[in-house]
Image (tube, rainbow, N blue to C red):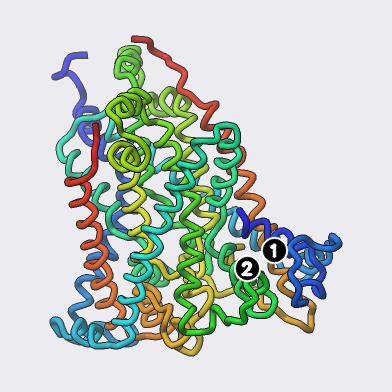
Amino acid sequence: MERNQMPFFRKLFRKVEPYLYLIPAFSLLILFVYYPFAKNTILSFFSVDKFRNINKFVGFSNYVRVLSDGNFIKAIRNTFIYVFTTVPISIIIGFALALLARKKHKLSIVYEALFALSMAVSASVIAMIFQLAYNPSMGIINKITGLNTSWLTNSKTALLSLIIIQIWANIGFNFIYIFSALRGMSEEVLESALIDGAVGISRLFKIIVPLISPTLLFLLVKDIAYAMTTASFTLIFYPYTDGRGGGPNGSTETIMSYIYGKAIAGTNYNAAFAATMVGFVLSGIMMALCLVLDQKKVNYD
Amino acid sequence: MLPLLYAVCISFMEPAEILTKELHFFPNSLSLENYRIVFKQTAIFRFMLNSFLIAFVSSFVRIITSSLSAFSFAFFEYKGKKLMFYLVTVSLIIPVDVLMVQNYFTVADMGMINTYMGMMVVFFVSSMNIFVMRQNFMAYSRTLKEAAMIDGCSNFLFYLRILLPSSKSVLATVFISSFVGTWNTYLWPMMVTNKNEMRTAQVAITMMNVNESSSFGYGSVMAAAVIILIPSILVFIIFQKKIIGGAMAGAVKG
């Protein structure tokens, strides 16, 4: 069929066709990702009432108000503690376990299955199991250590307890990825390194780490993004009732749980929207740092 | 793995044993009492059904949305394609959890609180899945599509009759990972439901309060946990095999 004999609609359809296929995914993306993002950004500069009607433009005063809220600062602090403990520790432990598993070839299948299993467990189930484990009188942790600590209700130990849970939860995923990355390392590179005299610890850092650095970066980014925006454990263990929550003395309040407390448990939308944007910016900064790391240290050959 | 073992052991212990101060790792005697209590006192099947429904439907819809858009990205050239793909990439960077609050308002305004649709709709698209599918489609041989076009096959029919059936492995992977992810999700279903019978298994289990009078103790909570874990663990075991066994049957060589 010659081009100029094609009916008009056919031609139009051909042009429009690829866009049509994008419509389902994009209408959803716009509705649930871009639109809320834009809405939140814009609304954070206005003062909103209980029914989310706009009152007036207030510039940055929402931000000023929320950043002077001691509880929010605490939430930010808690979130960063959370990130800087759970992420490195769970990656290092995952790495160590993967190295160990690599040596024992026969058992490695068992290890893989076991760790893969921990990936199938949801946050709520993990939370319930650890809630029992942390129970001062019945839980296994106090039984084994002989201590009497109220892990989850003591403001000094609450955050630590959550950190431990998160580390455990991350290890499985990290292990699987690092383990398969280790398996993918080319034998030739390793052998030539041995010839060059690289053994033991120096081999570890100079050869193995750079070889799997893309995987490590991926895990870093994923774990940081998750930890910066999580509130699951806080909300599960310390649900907001009567507008109060966030753990013993606010010690387990994260950025996200603060936002939840303001917007869903309460109706302070001004604080919630401003806090959300602050959360975005902080996450963005962490991601940008990861990108810098990618440029400088990650090895893609 | 240890905490899982712990949960299983506790679930089989009798309440008296759990309450003692001594350390018992394995139950002295296997008792199904906790499980009986769970089935009698909680609507656990309803909760599991809710979870299953949203997981299944969301994963299914996700396959459609991600494969259609990946099809567009991989097989067509058009103006603005780069921009559109860029938008997908950017959406990957935006941490979705932070948008939850706004999405809650959107869904509430549409009257979808306490509905299945409300729980599922945010999961209908995943930028990650679009990425993976696009990657997969781009490795697909062009000559096959050209051959089909010469034979008079339309683009859409190519997608439906040829591309999809031979991408079963990737589709399965996307489905399974979406299923497990949606089954396990907590925050969103918690936010959009306040009626007990609409709650998913994950949300319901966090609300199971230990009630001494009705003998619903920690053992029962652990029993419920084990019950909820079974589907995802089953799926995972099958998943491992799928990855090893799946491979695209080369329809065009060279």
Lower sequence index among marks 2 and 1:
2
Name the residue located 58 percent from the left edge and 48 percent from the top edge: A117
Name the residue located 30 percent from the left edge and 29 percent from the top edge: A193
Name the residue located 21 percent from the left edge and 84 percent from the top edge: A62
**Relative to A44, B217 lies left or right:** right
A245 shown above or below B252: below
What numbered label is drawn on residue A68? none
Q: Quadrant of residue B222?
A: bottom right
Q: Quadrant of residue B77?
A: top left
What numbered label is drawn on residue B205? 2
B99 or A284: nearer the viewer: A284
B188 or A138: nearer the viewer: A138
- Which amino acid type corresponds to the residue marked 1 in the rendered image? Ala
Q: Residue furthest front?
A: A197
Residue A19 image point, x, y percent:
25, 39
A147 or B174: nearer the viewer: A147
Residue A46 image point, x, y percent:
19, 81
What whole-number distance in Å separates the C-alpha atoms at marks 2 and 1? 7 Å
Quadrant of the frame with the C terminus of chain B: top left
Q: Secondary structure at mark 2?
A: helix
State which chain disc 2 sits on: B
- Which amino acid type corresponds to the residue marked 2 in the rendered image? Ile
Residue A102 image point, x, y percent:
49, 36
- Verify CB contact (< 8 Å) between mark 2 and mark 1: yes
Residue B30 image point, x, y percent:
84, 60
Q: Secondary structure at mark 1?
A: helix
Name the residue located 18 percent from the left edge and 40 percent from the top edge: B82
Question: Could you classify mark 2 by the number of other residues whose Cα lies within 10 Å: few (under 14), some (14-19), or many (20 or more)?
Answer: many
State which chain disc 1 sits on: B
Disc 1 designates what residue? Answer: B224
Respond whether the residues carrying marks 2 and 1 are from the same subunit.
Answer: yes
Question: Could you classify mark 1 by the number of other residues whose Cα lies within 10 Å: few (under 14), some (14-19), or many (20 or more)?
Answer: many
